[in-house]
Structures are given as C-alpha cells and as structure tokens.
Amino acid sequence: MYISNLILSNYRNYTRLKLDFPAKPILLQGKNAQGKTNLLEAIYLLSTTTSTYARKDDQLLNWHTMKEDVMPFARLEVTIVRHDETLQLAITIIREYERFKKEIRLNGSKKRAMDVIGQLNTVMFVPEDINLITGSPSTRRRYLDSVLCQIDSEYCRSLSRYNKVVSQRNALLKELNEGKRSIDQLIYWDEQLITHGSIIIIRRHDALLTLATVAHQRHLDLTEESERLRLSYLPKVNPHGDSADEKQIIPAPPIDDVQATFKTQLLASRNDDIIRGMTLLGPHRDDFQFLIDGVDIAFYGSRGQQRTAILSTKLAEVQLMKEKSGDTPVLLLDDVMSELDSERRTQITTLTKLVDQSFLTATDWNDYDITFRQNATCYTIQNGRLEHAQFGEDIFN
C-alpha cells in the first residue's frame, strides 16, 4: 500500500499542494512551523477521518480562507494504490451556516466515516506519543480504537454503537436515580451494552496480545536483551474472569463466555450505576500498562525507556496491521530522530524497509545518513511549499 498522489487545498498552511509520490521513503526537511507535521497530519486524517492535533474541524482550515472567503473550506484528496487496485479518497471540510461539516467521498461516492476507515492504513509515530504511556486511560483507549478501526470494520461498527448505547444508558440511569423511570427499562440497554461491548473486549484483548508478543521481542532487540517489555491489559470486564493470570498471554474465550461474564458483573454493578447515574462497567473504562521488568514505566521509567517502549509498540503495530489486512501500512514518522541514540536511529531506518512507503520529517538533514537520503525522495518545506532536494555522495547539491 502506498500514496501515489496527494492534493491539499486551504489546509493548515497549505494553500495549494499537489504532488506525486513513489513507493519509497519520503523525507521532508524544514524548520519548525513550516508545514512538515501538517502534511503528516493530513495523511493521518485521510486514513482515520480524525486529526491528531485539532479539537475542532475549523482549526484545520487555512487562516487566510477563514478570514477572507465567504464560504471557507479545506479539501484533502489522496490516490491510494493497494495491490492492483487504485482508490480515490477525498475529505472536504466546509462551513454550513455557523458550523463546519465533513464530506467524505470514496471513488466519487459519498460515504460515512466508518466506511472509509481502513482504505488507507497508517502507523504514526510522533514525539507526543510519550503520552500513550504517561497520559490518561482515555489516551490509550483512543490509540487502540484507532489501530483496530483501520483493520477491523466490525470493531469500528461495534464501537460506534456501543458509545451510543452508553450515552442512552447513562441518561436512563440518571432518570432512575430521580425515580422517573422503571428499572425494567434497563433490560434492553443492558443487552445492547453486552452485545457490542463483548466484541470490543475480545478484539482489544487479542490485538493487545499480538502487540505485546511482538513488542516484547522488538524491545529485546532494541535494548540488547537488557530489558523485558510487557503490555498488560486492564479491562473493566476481564474476559477470563477474576481468577485470570494477567501475566499469561492466552487468546480471549468464546464470545458467549465473555457475554455471560459481562452480564453477571453488570447486574452486580446495577445499584452503583443508578446511584452514580453512569455506567461504571465496560470497555469504555478499559486501560493497559507498559511494564519493563514488571515495573510500570508511566511512574518509574526514564524518558529513554518510555520512548523505546513506544518505538517497540509501533514496530509491533506495523506487523499487526500487515497480518490483519494483508497490506503494509504507510508510516508517518514526525521528528522521531531528535531524541534517539544511534542504535535506535538504525531501527527507525530499518523499519522503513518493512513497508512500501514512509513519510519522515526532520529539521536537520543529518538526522538521516547520506545513504538513506540518496535512496529516499527528499523535499525541503518552507511556508507550506515543497521543493525537491537531491544528495550527492557526501554533500547537498
């Protein structure tokens, strides 16, 4: 899988960008605030329909179009090559009255977001990924959701439905607390919660086991076998029951068993749910940990250990996506070399050989050796404009 063409119109600091790309590493060099990260964000947005940085869609529009145009808009278009298939994907963000909306089209046909997620698979590695370890459980859940939605359409549909059920059930719980509804009305929403939630639990569980197995080995390679990384799933509904050994990596049980476990625990939690007016049990409260030699590195790990653990996990993510979808994802690596030693820099360049295409950014050309630069397609970026750069044997031409 690779991107053969990208067009950006009025996106961030790009007024108009149209470029063809080969199936190889694409290296983007420029000073800060020139548009390197914006370009990677655009590709990720086309992949997942969500931005890694913007909280609202209007933040993605070029400042000048927001200020000067009567109908401000941004448009992102990409041509994706998968095996012998070519796909055209476009996202338009346009103001409609006082709000902004996204219009998504695949090969010219209007689609919902969940229908296009997975057409372009990406793995993104940015400096802020340290928050995956040190941040809140919701950060880790969003990460798992982003990975799984790209490779598992059933998961994505179940997640969407589950989130709606949680909202509806919470509204009912608040009314039950106020004595306005009958408790029998919970039966339907409990069934829906269990049906969709059990699929989420199983898919998260199995994905984390795959990530944990591969990340463990990659971490051994990165640390010369001096550290052992373990990803530990902390589900609110344990698919193996309360007696499960969290250190043992085993597949999830059949869905009927998970549903039975979920139902038992949900009934036991019902009174607390009504008192609190919210659903206290379910995958919307899941978490997972990064442990090195049994120690939670969110609290006791050095920054170097945390970055290496993230790198190991991203390496595992590439393999998971390839196994599940049959395609290698497009790698998006934003300024990842600045805090890595030479061994880990070598691992990054090796990682690009595992995929058809990667986009990498740097403020300094010397973050990448001359051999890598000669084998990559290189651009300089200044104020949202890209220019080709070519390298000789040891100097910049």
Image: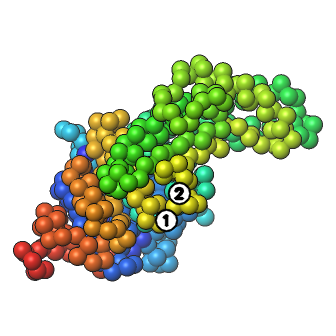
Q: Secondary structure at mark 2?
A: helix
Tell whether 187 sits left or right of 271.
left
**Sequence order check, earlier mark of 1 and 2:** 2
Q: Quadrant of the C terminus?
A: bottom left
Instruction: Residue 83: give x, y in percent of width and height.
Output: 21, 39
User: Which residue is tagged 2?
Assistant: 297
Circle 2 packing at 10 Å, graded few (<14), some (14-19), many (20+), is many
**Residue name at image x 18 percent, y 70 percent:** 369
Q: Are marks 1 and 2 in contact (CB under 8 Å)?
A: yes
**Residue name at image x 74 percent, y 30 percent:** 266
7 and 95: which is toward the camera: 7
Q: How is the image coloured?
A: rainbow
Tell whether 79 sits left or right of 185.
left
Instruction: Residue 154: give x, y in percent of width and height.
Output: 48, 32
77 and 342: which is toward the camera: 342
Circle 1 packing at 10 Å, graded few (<14), some (14-19), many (20+), is few
Q: Amino acid at mark 1?
A: Ser
Q: Quadrant of residue 166?
A: top right
Mark yes or no: residue 17 visible: no
Q: Amino acid at mark 2?
A: Ile
281 and 34: which is toward the camera: 281
10 vs 267: above or below = below
Q: Which mark is residue 302?
A: 1
Q: Secondary structure at mark 1?
A: loop
Instruction: Residue 262: give x, y in percent of width and height.
Output: 67, 27
Tell whether 324 sits left or right of 67.
left
Mark yes or no: residue 152 visible: yes
